[in-house]
Image (cartoon, grey):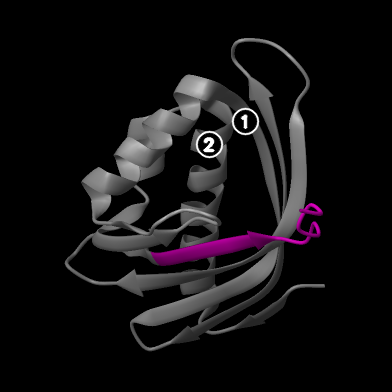
Amino acid sequence: MTERYGDAAELRLIDLVRDNHVGALNTGDAEAWTAQFAGDGVQMPPNAPENVGKERIRQWFVGLLSAFKVQFELDVEEVRIVGDWAFERGGYAISLNPVAGGPAMVDNGKYITIYRQGDGNGWKIARDIWNSNSPIPAQ
């Protein structure tokens, strides 16, 4: 059961941003995916440097799509709106299918997404961080 706190109409708008984000990832639409981020958004993928700004986030995504076809889903556990900011917490499942062929890489983990409303553009992803639940391989 998802815990939801805030105005119901605003929560539905955040749901739309999330749905557009996930849908664009699964269809490989870099422009639609990037459009969900604020211009000064920050993305913090695991095991990699942060991506600051919409253009750098888009470049990262294009790189991902050049190597993989993605199947992605979220399990939203909590969404809270506080003024012009909102945060979301939950889990994810992802399958990265190599474009060149071969077995898929499958993972699941947890995430935090922070949304910001403003600039007349509605809710946008301002910060996005995720990490795996899988143990670190033995060295």
Single out the residue that lies furthest toward the left: 119
x, y (%) of residue 136?
76, 58
Q: Which residue is mark 2?
A: 25
Disc 1 to disc 2: CB gap under 8 Å: yes
Q: Nearer the viewer, residue 83 or 71?
A: 71
Residue 8, how many percent across, how many down?
55, 75
For the point 17% across and 67% down, the residue is: 119
- In the rendered view, tell whether residue 6 sits above or below residue 114: below
Which residues make up the magenta segment?
127-139
What residue did someone put label 1 on? 70
Query: What kind of element bears circle 2?
Result: helix
- Count neighbours of disc 1 (C-alpha within 10 A) and say few if under 14, some if 14 to 19, many if 20 or more: many
Q: In the rendered structure, which disc, 1 or 2, sits on the residue that comes first in sequence? A: 2
Indicate whether residue 136 is drawn in magenta. Answer: yes
Q: Residue furthest top?
A: 100
Question: Is 57 in the magenta?
Answer: no
Distance CA(mark 1)–CA(mark 2): 7 Å
**Foreground disc of the pair 1, 2:** 1
Quarter of image, res 115: bottom left
The vertical placement of 88 against 33, above or below, is: below
Which quadrant, please, contains the N terminus?
bottom right
Marks counted in the figure total 2
Please give the name of the residue rendered at 59% of the width and 32% of the height, measured from the top-left corner: 26
52 or 125: nearer the eye?
52
The residue drawn where x is 49% and y is 44% is 20
Label 2 sits on what residue type? Leu
Residue type (three-letter) at the residue carrying disc 1: Val
**Residue 56 position in % (x across, y down):** 27, 46
Residue 112: image location, x then y, percent: 56, 70
In front of the other: 78 or 50: 50
Q: Is 121 drawn above or below residue 27 in the view shown? A: below
The label on residue 112 is none
